[in-house]
Image (cartoon, rainbow, N blue to C red):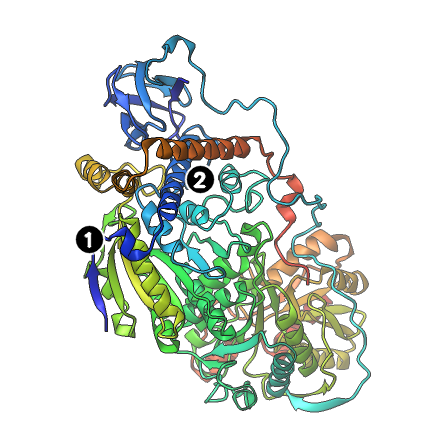
């Protein structure tokens, strides 16, 4: 059966080209893979190869012809001894389209209103026994409980085993679970992050500890391109149940390269969940939820919070649902949103404001993706004012996102423009006085709240 | 440390490869060749978009290597991945329909040429970032090690990826923890348009694992039996608890890096010489005929392969585009 050779598209953008040269003559035998002709595109000269064997029966477009449109027949290849008059046109001319999907057919689902919204399961008030402990201990207990519960969970990172954690978060885990499940790595972030992703693809549940999230920048390709996108790129076939955790944000006097908030970086990425808790109970309950979650979760801790003590639930089944903000202090006149260490500042600011006669509602965002838009919008519909606090830089930050959320969800309820309190737009300086100026302080939050309250 | 070169001709019988098995190699290599030629043609017709990296010329590497593996062993590779998927036993229809971005594709049209997976066939992608599959494969091997299940991972990478830092981060961990992994370096001599001697300080890549205690071997990647023999020994090495090993497969890609490659960095003579003198499929065909397989038998296989590819191409054009609602699915797994 004779087939036409069509002018090929040799790049994603090519629409026409020139037949520069024919390398086979009419009547010559051709085999699959033989170069038939050279085609000049706007970018390059490329070769056209035969895709089947036969005889080059006819050259339809002679060499030297310019502006030959893609898909124009340029030659005819016939079987040996075949009449060329009865050429069957090759190409994408399917007649009856059979609807036979190879993969399992799936019911089509309506798109959600926004990709970041996800209805969280309801959070019930915990009324059981609690123990007062540090955030550091709450994180350790969360990991230990989940490792007891599920053999697939393991901890990997720099200094997590013998050293007991650079910030002592993994204290005692090596002793309980042994070196098979508590694994010290070389200093090799991109390597062990990718290794964790591969292990998660294979069905294990790695907890990858970064000594600080500053070092995760070495590995961010694996977090985003490999961990976050693979489920989508595989049409839902692959899962990547992995937790990336470690301290984020500033520490004390460690200067620019070790002091940065990555909340908005990761919150930007579909396919990730991003958590940044403050209280001990939330650290424990959300880390347990993260470990049990079938998705990649970025869990942002804070060095300056590790030593703070809170009442933490004892129940090993205490879980805090991902995706739910919490009103930590109800108020009437201004909403203050914060996450991680900034919740503490927001609470202190609210106390100051109360003394000045301003009633502030403080929301601990806790999860940044999926974002609990409803809780913030409902609060602003009551207070009509909002201050967004974060430790990171203001530009394209979480506060900027909250401003957009307010425009979309609470525009008619606002009595003042949203005010951001954020880290100053500079690399973090070392000098003690400059560092203090660069990082949000309680008085900055108070001043912002007074400004939006016009008091 | 065993670092050796191996390009000697291999005798069929010595390897215990049955004539039936040899015919399967022939069929499987031919399937990749014809599939890729058709993919190139369909790209030319505008049915396939974006990037499309063809495997033509390198077929012996993946067929020889996959033939040396056991059920349950895991595979991961880069973006030049169509051949690996077919070699893993994935359905040509589903692969081609992914190339055309249709509902019937392995990723329901959401991944494309470089991003396909099959949990059923233990094929873990299909990764578009050069070198990123190497730590991932090391993690698959880590999972085998963690579970103690006696399985291994084969991680394919090219001579371009070999200069990425994360490859050595992976080698170090694999060497340190004796992970059951075979790193198959497909040395086709060009990373995109840069020849290996313009990119690598040392061009004998089987040495690259040595600093990490990983032995290496150079193999004639145009000879499926040489690949199979080296693959068997390497798989046994990794499976037996001795740790990782690298195989440098000396191979050649006939086509450009991707579809829009102008091929100005090498001569047509060089490509023609490889095609006429070292073609892996012609090589095996010749050996089969020498060993008593009839021309008719080979023609029959060629006909079967042609039908299979035609069927895949038809399916890939008939399968509908994804439902618009698919835009929003598979971002997250249900918790």
Q: Is residue A251 visible?
A: yes
In front here: A78 or B54? A78
Residue B88: x %, y % from top left: 46, 51
Q: Secondary structure at mark 2?
A: loop
In front here: B167 or B30? B30
A140 relative to A285 in the view: left or right: left
A268 relative to B31 in the view: left or right: right
Indicate the chain on which mark 2 is placed: B
Q: Which mark is residue A304?
A: none
Q: Earlier in the sequence, mark 1 or mark 2?
A: 2
Residue drawn at the location 52% of the way across and 30% of the way down: B314
Q: Is residue A426 above or below residue A116?
A: below
Q: Quadrant of the C terminus of chain B?
A: bottom right
> Which residue position holds label 1?
B198
B189 relative to B81 in the view: left or right: left
Q: Is residue A18 above or below residue A291?
A: above
Residue A55's image quarter? top left
In front here: B231 or A265? B231
Residue B285: x %, y % from top left: 29, 39
Cα separation, mark 1 vs mark 2, equals: 27 Å
> Which residue position holds label 2?
B50
Residue A319: x %, y % from top left: 72, 75
Are labels 1 and 2 assigned to the same chain? yes
Residue B184's image quarter? bottom left
* 10 Å crowding of disc 2: few (<14), some (14-19), many (20+): some
Residue B230: x %, y % from top left: 29, 60
């Amino acid at each position: 059966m004779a087939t036409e050779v069509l002018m090929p598209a040799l790049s994603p953008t090519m629409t026409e080209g020139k037949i520069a040269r024919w390398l086979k003559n009419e009547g010559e035998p051709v085999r699959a893979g033989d170069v038939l002709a050279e085609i000049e595109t706007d970018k390059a000269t490329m070769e056209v190869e035969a895709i089947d064997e036969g005889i080059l029966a006819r050259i339809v477009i002679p060499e030297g012809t310019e502006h030959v449109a893609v898909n124009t027949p340029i030659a005819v290849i016939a079987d040996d001894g075949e009449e060329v008059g009865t050429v069957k046109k090759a190409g994408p001319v399917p007649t009856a389209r059979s609807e036979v999907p190879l993969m399992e057919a799936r019911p089509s689902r309506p798109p959600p209103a926004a990709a970041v919204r996800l209805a969280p399961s309801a959070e019930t008030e915990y009324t059981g026994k609690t123990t007062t402990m540090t955030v550091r201990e709450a994180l350790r207990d969360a990991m230990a409980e989940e490792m007891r519960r599920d053999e697939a969970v393991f901890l990997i990172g720099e200094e997590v085993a013998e050293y007991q954690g650079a910030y002592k978060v993994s204290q005692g885990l090596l002793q309980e679970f042994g070196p098979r499940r508590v694994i010290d790595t070389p200093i090799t972030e991109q390597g062990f992050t990718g290794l964790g992703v591969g292990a998660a693809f294979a069905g294990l549940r790695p907890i990858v500890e970064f000594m600080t999230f500053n070092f995760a920048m070495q590995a961010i390709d694996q977090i985003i391109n490999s961990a976050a996108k693979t489920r989508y790129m595989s049409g839902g076939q692959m899962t990547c149940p992995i937790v990336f955790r470690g301290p984020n944000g500033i520490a004390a006097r460690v200067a620019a390269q070790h002091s940065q908030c990555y909340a908005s970086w990761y919150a930007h990425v579909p396919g990730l969940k991003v958590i940044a808790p403050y209280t001990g109970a939330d650290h424990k309950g959300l880390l347990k939820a993260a470990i049990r979650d079938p998705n990649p979760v970025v869990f942002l801790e804070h060095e300056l919070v590790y030593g703070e003590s809170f009442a933490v639930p004892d129940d090993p089944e205490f879980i805090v649902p991902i995706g739910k903000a919490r009103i930590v202090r109800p108020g009437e006149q201004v909403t203050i949103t914060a996450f991680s260490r900034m919740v503490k500042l927001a609470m202190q600011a609210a106390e100051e404001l109360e003394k000045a006669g301003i009633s502030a509602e403080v929301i601990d965002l806790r999860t940044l993706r999926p974002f609990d838009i409803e809780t913030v919008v409902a609060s602003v519909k009551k207070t009509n004012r909002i201050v967004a606090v974060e430790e990171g830089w203001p530009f394209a930050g979480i506060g900027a996102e909250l401003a957009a959320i307010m425009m979309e969800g609470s525009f008619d309820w606002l009595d003042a423009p949203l005010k951001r309190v954020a880290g100053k737009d500079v690399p973090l300086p070392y000098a003690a006085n400059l560092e203090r100026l660069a990082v949000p302080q309680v008085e900055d939050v108070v001043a912002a709240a007074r400004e939006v309250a016009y008091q | 440390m065993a670092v050796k070169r191996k390009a000697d001709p291999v005798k069929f019988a010595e390897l215990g490869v049955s004539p039936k098995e040899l015919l399967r190699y022939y069929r499987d290599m031919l399937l990749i060749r014809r599939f890729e030629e058709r993919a190139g043609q369909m790209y030319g017709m505008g049915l396939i978009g974006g990037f499309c990296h063809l495997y033509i010329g390198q077929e012996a590497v993946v067929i020889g290597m996959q033939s040396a593996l056991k059920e349950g062993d895991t595979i991961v590779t880069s973006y030049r991945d169509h051949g690996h998927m077919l070699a893993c036993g994935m359905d040509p229809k589903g692969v081609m329909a992914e190339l055309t971005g249709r509902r019937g594709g392995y990723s329901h049209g959401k991944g494309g040429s470089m991003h396909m997976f099959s949990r059923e066939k233990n094929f873990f992608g299909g990764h578009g970032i050069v070198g990123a599959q190497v730590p991932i494969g090391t993690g698959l091997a880590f999972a085998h090690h963690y579970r103690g299940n006696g399985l291994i991972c084969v991680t394919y990478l090219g001579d371009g990826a070999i200069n990425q830092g994360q490859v050595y981060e992976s080698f170090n961990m694999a060497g340190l923890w004796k992970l059951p992994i075979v790193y198959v370096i497909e040395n086709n001599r060009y990373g995109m348009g840069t020849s290996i001697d313009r990119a690598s300080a040392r061009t004998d890549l089987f040495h690259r694992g040595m600093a990490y205690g990983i032995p290496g071997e150079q193999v004639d990647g145009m000879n499926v039996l040489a690949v199979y023999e080296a693959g068997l020994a390497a798989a046994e090495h990794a499976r037996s608890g001795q740790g990782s090993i690298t195989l440098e497969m000396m191979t050649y890609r006939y086509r450009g890096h991707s579809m829009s490659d102008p091929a100005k960095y090498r001569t047509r003579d060089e490509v023609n010489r490889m095609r006429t003198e070292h073609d892996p499929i012609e090589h095996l065909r010749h050996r089969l005929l020498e060993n008593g397989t009839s021309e008719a038998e080979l023609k029959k296989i060629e006909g079967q392969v042609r039908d299979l590819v035609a069927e895949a191409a038809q399916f890939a054009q008939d399968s509908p585009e994804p439902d618009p609602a698919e835009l929003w699915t598979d971002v997250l797994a249900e918790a």
